[in-house]
Amino acid sequence: MKPNIPKRSAALAIVALAMFFTSCADHRPSGIESSAKRLESAHGEWPVIPFKYPGIDRALVKTVEYSPGRSADVYWPPDFDFSKKLPVVIFGIGLPEERFLENIGARVTDTGLFVSMCTYIATRGAAAVVMNSHEPLKDFYSCARYLENERELKLDLSRIFLWTRSEHAAFTLLLASVDGAYSSGVKGVCLFTPFLPQLAPVPRPSIPVLIVSAGRDLAVREKERTRYTERLRNNGNPISELRFERGMHAFEIHELGDGGSVETVAESLDFAIAVLLSGS
């Protein structure tokens, strides 16, 4: 004998079950798109790095406004279901947006260089963030607070890796220093062909640092790197070094056709992934 269930109650139960399974199936925030669109529209003056890695065009990306008039792009792995928090690679940029618009005609978030690196990080299992700013130091902290408070983004700000290049190094190192507001969450730093002035900050002693150098960079960069490496060693930082002998400064932008340059960039990003996922 079939149980006598009122039609209205049965309908409500079906709707409730449908809503439950829908919410379980997809926790993703609104406004997310595929990285394929970003890769296609990326600014060519800082070209897309041609990484060969499965899913590079299927990463998820969303533009967020972390404070009025200031935006950042957040990247997640393909098919990420937003059921757990991810460690995050944040790209340290020490120049205001106006300088980028003046010099290369694009915002940082629209350059092929950063779009492709963010998608690579995402396909390797972590989240990535690149931001536009007007006052870099102040805006970094505003962005970090926003990312921490927006729980739907599923970013673990207790596991941050900072990747930076060229003249942005000293700014980024300040974020990883003892006095940095988020320094306790920084688990590693990559300095890619960095400018390292004499008073460049050093990260907390336990933070591993990767320094990527170019064999044909200016002699002054070599002296800076040697001096800074010694400071890191004296501070107790684990140091790794990666060198592209044939490369000039900014080879990740200007020498992508030279064998080994793409692989060197990928190795620096793989270092970030290894550091972040080692404790997961």
Image (tube, helix red, strand yellow):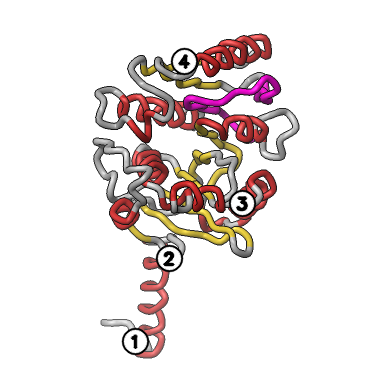
Task: Name the front one of labels 4 and 2.
Answer: 4
Task: Name the residue that disc number 3 marks.
Answer: 143
Tell me the crowding category of disc 1: few under 14, some 14 to 19, or many 20 or more residues within 10 angstroms, Cα based.
Answer: few
In the rendered image, which quarter is residue 201 located in?
top right
Q: Is residue 196 magenta?
A: yes
Q: Is residue 188 above or below residue 138?
A: above
- Residue at horizontal 46%, vertical 62%? 29
User: Marks 3 and 1, how far apart in space?
Assistant: 56 Å
Task: Name the residue that disc number 1 marks.
Answer: 4
Mark 3–mark 2 CB contact (< 8 Å): no
Secondary structure of the residue carrying tag 3 is helix
Residue 62 locus on image (x, y percent): 44, 58
Q: Earlier in the sequence, mark 3 or mark 2?
A: 2
Give, as a single range, the part of the protein colored magenta. Answer: 185-204
Mark 4–mark 3 CB contact (< 8 Å): no
Q: Is residue 88 above or below residue 186?
A: below
Task: Name the residue that disc number 4 marks.
Answer: 241
Residue 278 locus on image (x, y percent): 47, 27
Between 234 and 171, the one lying in front of the other is 171
Task: Name the residue that disc number 2 marks.
Answer: 31
User: Marks 1 and 4, how far apart in space?
Assistant: 73 Å
User: Marks 4 and 3, how far apart in space?
Assistant: 30 Å
Mark 4–mark 2 CB contact (< 8 Å): no
Between 220 and 37, the one lying in front of the other is 220
